[in-house]
Image: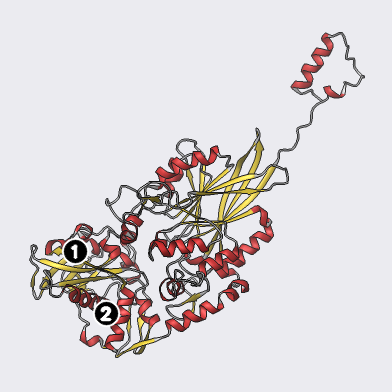
Amino acid sequence: MPLNRRAFLESSAAVGAGVALTAGVAAPAEAREARPRPAKRYSFTVMGTTDLHGNVFNWDYFTDKEFDDKAHNDVGLAKISTLVNQVRAEKGEGNTLLIDAGDTIQGTQLSYYYAKVDPITQAGGPVHPMAQAMNAIGYDAAALGNHEFNYGIPVLRKFEEQCDFPLLGANALDAKTLRPAFAPYSMHCLRTPHGKDVKVAVLGLTNPGIAIWDKANVTGRMVFPGLEEQAAKWVPKLRSMGADVVVVSAHSGSSGTSSYGDQLPYIENAAGLVAEQVPGIDAILVGHAHTEIPEYRVKNKETGKDVVLSEPLKWGQRLTLFSFDLVWEKGRWVVEKAGAQVLNSNTVAEDPEITGLLADEHKKVVAYVNQVIGTSTAAMTTADAPWKDEPIIDLINVVQAETVKAALAGGQYANLPVVSQASCFSRTARIPAGEISIKDAAGLYVFENTLEARLMTGAQLKDYLEYSAKYYVQTPAGVPVDTAKLTNADNTPDYNYDALSGLTYEIDIAKPAGSRIVNLSFRGAPIDPAAQFVLAVNNYRANGGGAFPHVAAAPQLWANSDEIRNTIIQWVKAKGTVDPGTFASVDWKLTRDGVPVF
């Protein structure tokens, strides 16, 4: 057996001292080959969710039945809890962490009810169902999402107080001191069999777009610098504090794009850029974009090492599992291997502990959404609304236009014509013939948007419509039109296609984007580019959401603090009966070379 280097040197020294090593005579024990000790190794798992949006149960409060979609996904923390329990049983609870990447307290009527109807902020008020469920499941940390700010800072702070885990936001800063307004990170120690703990840092980053989308709630109170900038500041600090592993929980997509154009110098979907530009990160839990990314690797420019990214599908449809294999080297733990995968929540049953815990809250909300607020003379649906001017979208626009006209009555702008914008938020929304309930109205307007009035010109409205019309895939005349492939050009979501009422126009989908608006008229005459109009518009769009031209810079004439959803509900209650024949009209249509598509 050959001697190793240390044994060889010791043997040479012995010979030099006059000690002969002859054949057949055993070498001293210290001269024998030293057997290498096996390396210390440890593996652990970080589980992650994102964009839960108020989903605890596998239930759709807008239809008042069990959730289902074309892919037969399931939703909710009760399903996630079952998956988490399985992973903990397999890996050992002490070898796991559970984190979230934000957008937790907005999105369902369950979360709305405890923010507005029976608010958690009232004296002796309830504990938010999302806090109850996440506490019971045992979350270790959660990043702030932009929708956390929808109900105002007091609701968010109360939710934070009710959580047994920290809400993280390293780039949510106090506007005056520029110090973190929330905990930037959390540090977690995992015990290993080797007596050497592993320190895992979780850095939370949220979306700069909050400054635009929730301007009314955060202006003068908080600012939201870029994710890359703040990650570059905090990751070295976490490493200097002894973090062996750094995981970022980022409420930011991975694409490097923004929906607010040049209104902010920061990127909305910056998770991939953070991985690429900031050394020292091992993995990023991605949120915000509502896409499924089981595993995505980005090479860091400085170190050349891969950073593992994963985004589980929204609403609790998936659970991300980051796996880390560590080795003890030179007195510290080093990540030897990392990977990610997602688990599908439709493969398991709901955890009865979670459903039982919140059974009473669920019943209250079901009773609330089934309250009858009026009747309709005809059924209306959004099924064709992405490509046809449908009465159900006209309903949104007539409510908004009437509300703005009433608000401006008697003032400087009372005599200006009002134009209203609306989007198809859900292709499954419907108003039935007969009784209308809160859930029907809420299902029509699923976001917590509020209403504003902005001053626009005819020329600006045309630009606005041209921008909106990029939603359609260019389709030459004579080519069959497949509605399944007609919309969402350039990945434009349905909520970023606006139809305007109060004007008439055609969208020629045979033409390239930017030159599609044809026969734009007001009261039967071509629109005057210099004429002034009042645009009734939701606050998301008014503040730059979707990067529509002109509107964010347009003068604000009026703004309301109540959700458009509630405005619709109150309008229906006041009318008693909704008759589409009194407000529905075909203001726009798709054409090709002057020939209607439908």
Residue 157: x and y in percent read: 45, 61
Q: How is the image coloured?
A: secondary structure
Quadrant location, the N terminus? top right
The answer, for residue 504, to whether it is visible in the render is: no
Instruction: Tell me which corner region of the image, top left, top right, bottom left or bottom right, holds residue 555.
Output: bottom left
Residue 108: x and y in percent read: 44, 72
Pointer 1: what residue?
A: 516
- Horizontal relation, residue 375 to residue 75: left or right: left
Instruction: Tell me which corner region of the image, top left, top right, bottom left or bottom right, holds residue 568.
Output: bottom left
Q: Is residue 426 above or below residue 43?
A: below
Neighbour tally class for label 2: few under 14, some 14-19, many 20 plus, Cα within 10 Å: many
Quadrant location, the C terminus? bottom left
Name which residue lies at 54% across and 39% down: 239
- Which kind of residue does numbered mark 1 sit on? Arg
Name which residue lies at 53% across and 42% down: 238
Pointer 2: what residue?
A: 395
- Horizontal relation, residue 498 to residue 344: left or right: left
Viewer-nearest residue: 533 or 583: 533
Name which residue lies at 50% across and 72% down: 126
